[in-house]
Amino acid sequence: MPFQQAPKFWLYSHNFTHTGAPLVLGAIARELAEQGWRRQLRLLSWGGHHDRVHTKLRRELEAEGFHCRVLNPEQAAPKPKPNDRILLNSLALPEAVIKTALARLECGEIKRLDWYGHEGNPSQLLADKQWPQRLLPLLSTGKLQMRVPSIHTLGSYQNWLEYSGSNLAVQTPLLPLKNGGCSLFDQPLPTFNSLRLQLTGMAGDGNKGHTMAIAFNPSSYPKWSRSKSKNPTTYCELHFIGLEMDSSAYLSYGNCVCGAMPYWVIALIGHPMAAASQILTANG
């Protein structure tokens, strides 16, 4: 079949930020490319201006030969051909984009729709009761295939949809880990001299819940570890699987975190490790 007539595989993302769900989308695109789909893949993002400013992930994918396009939230997706495939990579896509994709599936314009629900609470993003009512028949026939990243998340979706069949299943994303071949027991034993947290992504000023995740630290951390010197500090590493790598993202999040955490040295560490110039210090 000539390339121009070959079916395309459209991958829809709510944005191209260097964070959890878009990074998984990149991993899916690379896996599909290995199966011979590279030239047919079309990666679309509705991140608008934000994606045109934060370009790290998009430039990485484009450098690898992937066709990427940034749309504004109000823009419609290109119309697919009957044999094309579509993957919705988030529940946070614009509602009009989701509804249009479902309508195309329902009327037979496309034969199958895949949807990866990264979000843990689907009813928070899709609160209207019409959503389960609309999705259930499509799941039951297998025209809609939904995947979630964990067993815990699967339970939330099963309760939301009142469906527990095989067309809603767990597909754990493959995440890159440093020193992946090293046994946990070969690592240094933890002490109270430092604290290390690993978070799945970061955007803006911590609005994904990371500020809440570390808010307990100043109150719960043993005070004796800070009371033995005139200038006590505690070193805290925040490890991000996905991280916006530009200076404005570091500063906005660092200020949000450090402002409430005196006597802490905060290191924001992504993949790869952050440079020394990106370490933020708070001295209350």
Image: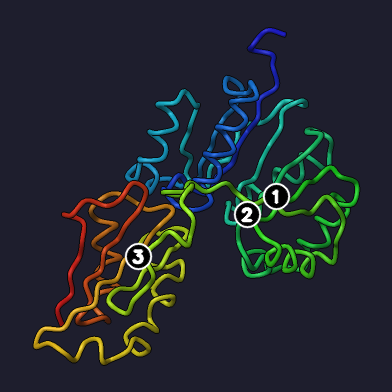
Residue 145 relative to residue 186: left or right = right
In the image, what residue type sits under mark 2? Glu
Residue 65's label in the rendered image is none
Does residue 92 lie above or below 28 as drawn?
A: below
Direction front: furthest residue: 186
> Dot 2 corresponds to which residue?
95
* Image vertical order of residue 84 relative to residue 172, above or below: above
Residues at badges 1 and 2 in contact (C-beta under 8 Å)?
Answer: yes
Neighbourhood count class around disc 3 (C-alpha, 10 Å): few under 14, some 14–19, many 20 upward = some
The amino acid type, in three-letter code, at marker 3 is Leu
Q: In the rendering, at what x and y percent does residue 88 appear?
A: 64, 45
Q: Could you say which quadrant of the image residue 95 lies in?
A: bottom right
**Are there few (<14), some (14-19), or many (20+) residues within 10 Å of tag 2?**
few
Q: Could you tell me how far apart the alpha carbons at marks 2 and 3 are, in whole angstroms? A: 33 Å
Residue type at mark 1: give it: Lys
Please give the residue where the numbered disc 3 appears in the rendered image.
238
Q: Which residue sits furthest top?
A: 2
> Which residue position is annotated with label 1?
99
Q: Name the mark nearer the viewer: 1 or 3.
A: 3
Q: Specify whether residue 199 is in view.
A: yes
Q: Is residue 26 left or right of residue 261?
A: right
Q: CA distance from mark 1 to mark 3?
A: 37 Å
